[in-house]
Image (tube, rainbow, N blue to C red):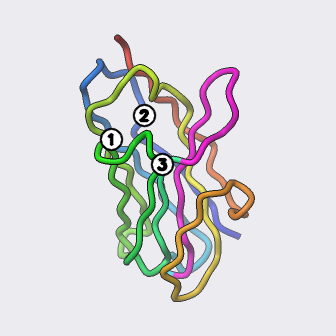
């Protein structure tokens, strides 16, 4: 089992920045690949960013490339999503997800690739 708890959401103006955190517990953090997803009202959940268990690979949705950065700190069992140049269309509930995989450089962008999910944190970008 992996327990995930997100934090760092809030209200920000267009062009602003936020950093989301996802703290993991329950398994060796270095053995899990992590991802961030988001879901806006009335829309399906969509992939945002992912980082491999090794930390050596990252992947991003086209809509956030160049603006968002995913990173992990295995010493703190935490993955981060730094979000810059935020737009109103970034407004959503952001959730982190985990997949157990050992010593891998693979990133995963599909919801069904992940077995564990956090409860989500709201990000609202005002225009």
- The quarter holding residue 113 reads bottom right
* Residue picked out by circle 1: 83
Residue at horizontal 50 percent and vertical 47 percent from the top: 48
* Residue picked out by circle 2: 9
Determine whether the residue tagged by mark 3 lies in a helix, strand or loop: loop
Residue at horizontal 52 percent and vertical 84 percent from the top: 104
> Is residue 43 a member of the stretch shown in magenta?
yes
Residue at horizontal 48 percent and vertical 48 percent from the top: 61
Determine whether the residue tagged by mark 1 lies in a helix, strand or loop: strand
The front one of 89 and 81 is 89
Whole-percent x, y for residue 85 in the image: 26, 32
- Seen as rendered, the residue at the extreme bottom is 103
The mark closer to the camera, 1 or 2, is 1
* Residue picked out by circle 3: 61
The front one of 118 and 42 is 42
Is label 2 in contact with label 3 (beta carbons under 8 Å)?
no
> Which range is magenta?
31-47
Of callouts 1 and 2, the N-terminal one: 2
- The quarter holding residue 86 reads top left
Determine whether the residue tagged by mark 2 lies in a helix, strand or loop: loop
Residue at horizontal 37 percent and vertical 57 percent from the top: 70
The mark closer to the camera, 3 or 1, is 3
The front one of 63 and 119 is 63
Whole-percent x, y for residue 31 in the image: 55, 81
Crowding around mark 1 (Cα neighbors within 10 Å: few <14, some 14 to 19, many 20+) is some
């Amino acid at each position: 089992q992996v327990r995930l708890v997100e934090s760092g959401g809030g209200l920000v103006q267009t062009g602003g920045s936020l950093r989301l955190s996802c703290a993991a517990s329950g398994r060796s953090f270095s053995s899990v690949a992590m991802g961030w997803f988001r879901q806006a009202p009335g829309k399906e959940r969509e992939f945002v960013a992912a980082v491999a268990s090794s930390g050596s690979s990252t992947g991003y949705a086209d809509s956030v490339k160049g603006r968002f950065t995913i990173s992990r700190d295995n010493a703190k069992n935490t993955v981060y999503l730094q979000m810059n140049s935020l737009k109103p269309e970034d407004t959503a509930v952001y959730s982190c997800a985990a997949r157990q995989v050992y010593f891998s450089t693979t990133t995963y962008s599909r919801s069904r690739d992940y077995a564990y999910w956090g409860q989500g944190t709201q990000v609202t970008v005002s225009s």
